[in-house]
Amino acid sequence: MDPLPLFGTGYRFKGDVCMRVGEDDSTNQYLDDAADLVACPEDTENLGVFVTDTGAQEVARRDGYVLYSVPRG
């Protein structure tokens, strides 16, 4: 399996450890026009705060990352 197609300089702010995820054969099922697909390292501290602050919903785990669907708005 190819590595996650991560892009950007951090999700929500430059330098954040979470990153947006692009489309590939395994992520396309989680993409949504009304939400960002975001990957955060599994060992990131304060993931609960990220979920609360953004309304993120966990959709998968892959390559040491937790994938979240984060509503835009």
Image (cartoon, grey):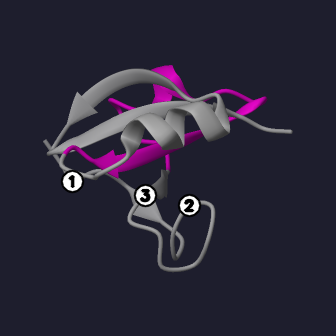
Is 10 rendered above or below residue 65?
Answer: below
Q: What stretch is highlighted in magenta?
A: 22-42
The residue carrying mark 3 is: 18
Question: Is 16 left, or right, of 65 in this rendering?
Answer: right
Q: Which kind of residue does numbered mark 3 sit on?
A: Cys
- Residue lying furthest right: 73
Q: Which kind of residue does numbered mark 1 sit on?
A: Pro
SS at mark 2? loop
Report how far apart the C-alphas of labels 2 and 1 lie in the structure.
Answer: 18 Å
The residue carrying mark 2 is: 11
Name the foreground residue: 50 vs 69.
Answer: 50
Is 21 rendered above or below residue 60?
Answer: below
The verdict on residue 45 being magenta is: no
SS at mark 1? loop
Question: Is 58 left, or right, of 2 in this rendering?
Answer: right
- In primary-sequence order, the first of circles 2 and 1 is 1
Asked whether the residues under the numbered discs 2 and 3 touch, taking CB atoms below 8 Å apart as contact, a structural biologist would say yes
Name the foreground residue: 26 vs 60.
Answer: 60
Name the foreground residue: 41 vs 45.
Answer: 45
The residue carrying mark 1 is: 3
